[in-house]
Structure formats: C-alpha cells, structure tokens
Image (cartoon, helix red, strand yellow):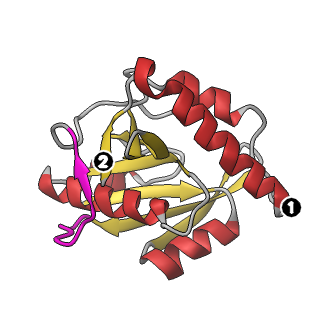
Amino acid sequence: MLLMLPADSARHRDGVRAMVTARVAWLRGRGLSAPEGIAETLAGQVGEPDWPVWVLEAGEAVVGCTTVLSECPAWAFTQHEREEPSVFLASTWTLPSADRFGHVIARWALDQAARTGRLHVRRGAFHSALADYYCRGQGWTLLREVDRRGRTGYIMSRPAERQPDLVVRTATAPIATGGRVAE
C-alpha cells in the first residue's frame, strides 16, 4: 500500500536522503544533471515548518517526496494567479521505478487540493524534458518560461480535481496551510 504523509525528521530524513541519492545517480547515469548536494538539502528540510515536505511510502520505504507550499512564488506566477486558491509543488523527487511514483504524488496533490477548496496545483521544472513529460504525460499546462537565476524555469498548472481511483492513502489531515515561498 502507498501512503502519503508529512515527513517526520526522525522517521524520514535518512529515507529521503537515500531516495534522492538514488535518483541523482540514475539521472547522472543517463547524462542528465542534478544539483550538487540536493540529497542533503532535501533531507535537511524534512521537519522544517517553512518547507512542509510530504513523503510517499511503500511499506516502510520512502519512494518519493514533495514540498507542498500554500503560496506560489512571485518570480513564477502573476499577481492574479497568486491570488487564486492553489498549492505549489516544489522539489518532487522519486525513486527510479516503473511504478510512476511521481504521477502518484501529482494525482494525490490534485485530489488533496480539491478536497481543501484549492482551484489549482502549480509546479515548475528546470529541465525542458521534465516539463514536456509533465505536460504531455500528466496533463499539466505550461503557463510560461521564466529566467530564474540564470536557468530557464518551466511554470505549469493543473486544475485541482478529485481523483476517485487514487491508489494512495493520506495518513493525516489534508494539505495544511503553511509553507513559505523562496524569493
């Protein structure tokens, strides 16, 4: 069974580190880049109230994570878009697998956002191939491309909607409000 729950520093920090390390090795083995030190950075965010990290567990193993923010960053979204009730997914990482854990996390976010009265789930990517996969393979809409610290950011959105055939349970209350956006 798959379970989505708020990350707990004592329980999930090492699992997040190991999962992201495995994904980074997978990416680099295919000639793709990943930020230096990203596994340590994400593991360090586990349990931080300003960065509400959620983990996807299969049994006791961490197979994915995402940060769910209640505000969308001003550098990526218009004032009007930021005023619409939405959540922003940041730093979504999954264990390399044929199980499409990233798709599971995205569908969970769409469902939870709809359950809590949000209109949209927003996200960004810094790889054109990943943005293309999100748009073509998962139904996201590319809103715009932006320059962010010398990199091209692909900014996307999807309407929040219930997912009746969702294969993941949520261990606690739906997405809480909270989380700040990096400027």
Residue at image location 42% in from the left, 78% down from the top: 139
Residue at image location 77% in from the left, 49% down from the top: 25
Quadrant of the drawing holding the C terminus: top right
Q: Is residue 43 left or right of residue 57?
A: right
Asked if marks 2 and 1 touch (Cβ < 8 Å), the reply is no
Overall secondary structure of the magenta stretch? loop
Q: Is residue 24 left or right of residue 88?
A: right
In space, the residues marked 2 and 1 are separated at their CA atoms by 32 Å
Residue type, label 1: Gly
- For label 1, the SS is loop
Residue picked out by circle 1? 31
The correct choice, above or below, for 46 with respect to 90 in the image is above
- Nearer to the camera, 37 or 116: 37
- Nearer to the camera, 6 or 147: 6
Residue picked out by circle 2? 3
Q: Position of residue 49 (x, y in %)?
A: 37, 21
The correct choice, above or below, for 135 with respect to 62 in the image is below
Please tell me whether mark 2 or mark 1 is closer to you in this view: 2
Q: Position of residue 126 (x, y in %)?
A: 66, 56
Q: Which stretch is magenta?
A: 160-171
Task: Judge whether residue 130 is colored magenta.
Answer: no
- For label 2, the SS is strand
